[in-house]
Image (cartoon, rainbow, N blue to C red):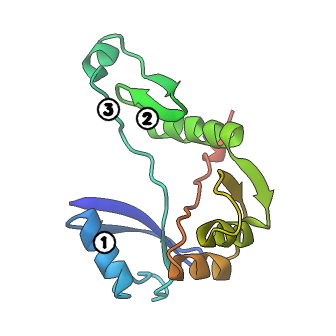
Amino acid sequence: MIIYDLMCDDGHRFEGWFPSADAFERQLARGQVICEICGSPGITRLLSPVHMKHSQAKEASENHRPVKALEGGELTAIGEIDEISFLKTLRHYVKKNFENVGENFSQLARKMQTGEIPHRNIVGQATPEERRELQENNIPHFILPDVPPEFDN
């Protein structure tokens, strides 16, 4: 069983439970995943904080501290990492390694997908309609979750 954090085009957030990642993708493609609040079929999977483990997890947990590292340009965690630390680390990684293109996000993502411009890491804003169009055109994107204000220090 896999649980995804989902959001509809109207901004309603909810959980979806699926037998597998493939089952989620099949149901989404067939329009079977709908918002449980408003019934909208325009669904985006949100990036979810998870417990990440590495082969050195036992050693890290024995030291009672999560160890985060950037290895070869990839975000990794050694040991368990709590959700807030994960979000803060992810947001820091995106800020450091992605170009903020603001409201041009959807336009540039489309151009990269069609090969008009070279691929690069971008972050920006997209309206619900733009997100729906990206999803319909199978253009990879996700919504970067915010750190709850009480933990954003």
- Residue at 31% across, 18% down: 61
Give the residue type that dot 2 points to. Asp
Q: Indicate which disc, 2 or 1, sits on the residue closer to the N terminus.
A: 1
Q: Nearer the viewer, residue 18 or 148?
A: 18
Specify whether 82 is left or right of 16.
right
Mark 1 residue crowding within 10 angstroms, few (<14) / some (14–19) / many (20+): many
Q: Which badge, 1 or 3, is on the more N-terminal residue?
A: 1
Q: Quick one: SS at disc 3?
A: loop
Residue 87 in picture, x, y percent from top left = 54, 42
Q: Nearer the viewer, mark 2 or mark 3?
A: 3
Residue 132 or 86: which is nearer the viewer? Answer: 132
Helix, strand or loop at disc 2? loop
Residue under label 3: 53
Instruction: Confirm or deny contact between disc 1 and disc 3 (CB under 8 A).
Output: no
Picture residue at 59% right of the left edge, 37% below the top: 88
Front residue of this view, candidates 129 and 107: 107
Direction from residue 23 to residue 131 in the image, left or right: right
Is residue 137 in view from this perspective?
yes
Answer whether residue 10 is visible to the viewer in this image. no
Could you tell me how far apart the alpha carbons at marks 2 and 3 are, in whole angstroms?
A: 11 Å
> Which residue is found at the position 78% from the left and 58% from the top?
101
Q: Secondary structure at mark 1?
A: helix
Q: Are marks 2 and 3 in contact (CB under 8 Å)?
A: no
Screen quadrant of the C terminus: top right
Q: Specify few, some or many for label 3: CA neighbours under 10 Å numbering under 14, 14-19, or 20 or more.
A: some
Residue 49 position (above or below residue 12): above
Graded by Cα atoms within 10 Å as few (under 14), some (14 to 19) or many (20 or more), the crowding at tag 2 reads: few
What's the mark number on residue 101? none
Q: Which residue is mark 1?
A: 24
Instruction: Please tell me the numbered disc located at residue 82.
Output: 2
- At label 1, the amino acid type is Phe
Residue 75 locus on image (x, y percent)? 50, 35
